[in-house]
Every structure is written in C-alpha cells, then in structure tokens.
C-alpha cells in the first residue's frame, strides 16, 4: 500500500502528463512545427521518468528499510557484520535511486551470510553441579561469552544448567568443557 501523499503526487503528475499528451495530439492535428512537437514529447517522457522515479524510490526505500531491519534482527551485535549494517543504515537517508538497489544487494548478501551462519550454529547443554548461585551462573556466562565462537549463553542456576550456542568451525564441545573445567567448574554434557 502506497502512502496517500505519494499516491496523490503520482496522480497529479500523471494528470499533468495526460494534459501534455492531449496537447501533443492537438499539435499533430494542426500540423504545427515538428521541433515544438518533439519538445512536447520530451516533456512527456521527462514527466513519466520523474513519476516512475518517485514510485521506485518509495518502493526501494521501504524494501531496503525492511532488509536493514531483518539484518539487524539476525545480528544480535556480535555477528561480524554489524559495522557493514551500521554503514548502510547511516547512508540510508541520503541514497539515490541507483544506490538504493546497490545497497539492497549488499544487505541481501549480509542477511544471507547471517542466515547461513545461524543455520550452522550448534547447541550444547551442560549440567554443572557446582554452579550453586546466580553469581556462579553469571561468571560461567561471562567466561563462555569471551570464548571465540560462542554466540549465545543461557544459564539456569536453579537447574544447574547452561545452554551454549556456538559455531562448530571456531570451537567445539570439548573445548567448551575444558574452558569451564579450567575455571573450576565441573561440567557434564546433558543427554
């Protein structure tokens, strides 16, 4: 659905073009100067171009805004693409029509990368018997979040449980268990 003000502007422009076309038809009937007729054709073409650009600009801006939003949602802040997303987001208000299409392609690639990364993530749940309080849970969470490849950590002190989402290309279950063991905890993999 197009905004009302854009729809009104498009209709006004099209009505103006309609008047120009009627004028060209009259000029043809009256066999006026071909140079003047050509100028009217150019004016009609220019009017169509401007109208088309208005519509495309609106559609492309909305599309790019949605794509930026999707990319931001897929990137929780530690995805490795946050700088590129921020640059596009900051450039957004000043982009011309053709730049919009380039940025849509760029943000599409970022979003596709993020989706592939998300799909390749692995999860592990560990029981930690000596996680006895919320302070332990926070310390475990901090240790794991500093570990390369760890995307997300969710600790549940009352259940003595930690859920870890990680990239298997950067770390693995054994390394995570070793990291926690080195910190003084006794993790066991949930079955």
Image (tube, rainbow, N blue to C red):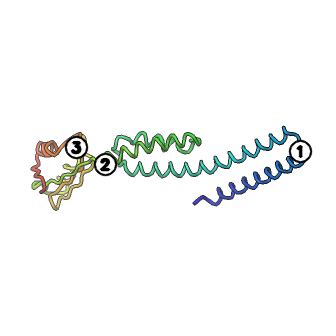
Q: Is residue 35 left or right of residue 132?
A: right
Query: Disc 1 versus disc 2: distance between alpha carbons?
Result: 68 Å
Q: In which quarter of the image is the N terminus?
A: bottom right
Which circle's residue, 1 or 3, is located before the other in the chain? Answer: 1
The quadrant holding residue 12 is bottom right
Mark 3 highlights which residue? 168
| Marked residue nearer the N-terminal end (3 or 2) | 2
Write the residue at 18% across / 58% down: 157
Q: In this view, does 7 lie above or below 24?
A: below
Q: Are marks 3 and 2 in contact (CB under 8 Å)?
A: no
Write the residue at 64% across / 60% down.
4
Residue 132 pos. (x, y %): 13, 57
- Quick one: SS at disc 1? loop
- Residue 74 in the image: x percent, y percent? 37, 50
Asked whether 28 or 126 is in front, the reply is 28
Identity of the residue drawn at 87% across and 49% down = 29
Q: Earlier in the sequence, mark 1 or mark 2?
A: 1
| Rendered-image quadrant of the C terminus | bottom left
Secondary structure, mark 3, is loop
Q: How far apart are marks 3 and 2 (CA)?
A: 11 Å
Instruction: Name the foreground residue: 21 vs 114.
Output: 21
Q: Where is residue 170 in the image (x, y as percent from the top left)?
A: 23, 39
Q: Name the residue under label 2.
A: 118
Farthest residue, direction top: 35
Counting from the top left corner in percent of width and height, residue 124 is at: 18, 52
Q: How crowded is mark 1: few (under 14 residues within 10 Å), some or many (20 or more)?
A: few
Reading the image, the residue beneath label 1 is 31
Say whether marks 1 and 2 touch (CB < 8 Å): no
Q: Residue at x 61, y 59 (%)?
A: 3
Between the residue at mark 1 and the residue at mark 3, the CA separation in whole angstroms equals 77 Å
- 25 vs 107, left or right, is right
- Disc number placed over residue 109 in the picture, else none: none
């Amino acid at each position: 659905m197009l905004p009302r003000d854009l729809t009104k502007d498009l209709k006004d422009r099209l009505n103006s073009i309609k008047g120009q076309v009627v004028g060209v038809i009259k000029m043809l009937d009256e066999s006026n100067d071909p140079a003047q007729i050509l100028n009217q054709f150019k004016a009609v073409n220019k009017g169509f171009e401007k109208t088309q650009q208005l519509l495309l600009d609106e559609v492309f801006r909305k599309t790019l805004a949605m794509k930026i939003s999707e990319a931001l949602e897929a990137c929780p802040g530690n995805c490795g693409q946050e700088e590129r997303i921020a640059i596009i987001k900051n450039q957004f208000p000043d982009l011309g029509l053709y730049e919009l299409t380039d940025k849509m392609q760029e943000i599409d690639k970022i979003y596709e990368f993020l989706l592939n990364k998300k799909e390749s993530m692995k999860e592990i749940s560990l029981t930690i018997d000596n996680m006895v309080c919320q302070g332990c849970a926070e310390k475990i969470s901090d240790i794991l979040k500093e570990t390369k490849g760890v995307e997300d950590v969710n600790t549940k002190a009352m259940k003595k449980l930690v859920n870890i989402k990680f990239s298997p290309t950067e770390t693995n279950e054994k390394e995570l268990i070793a990291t926690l063991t080195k910190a003084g905890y006794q993790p066991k993999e949930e079955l």
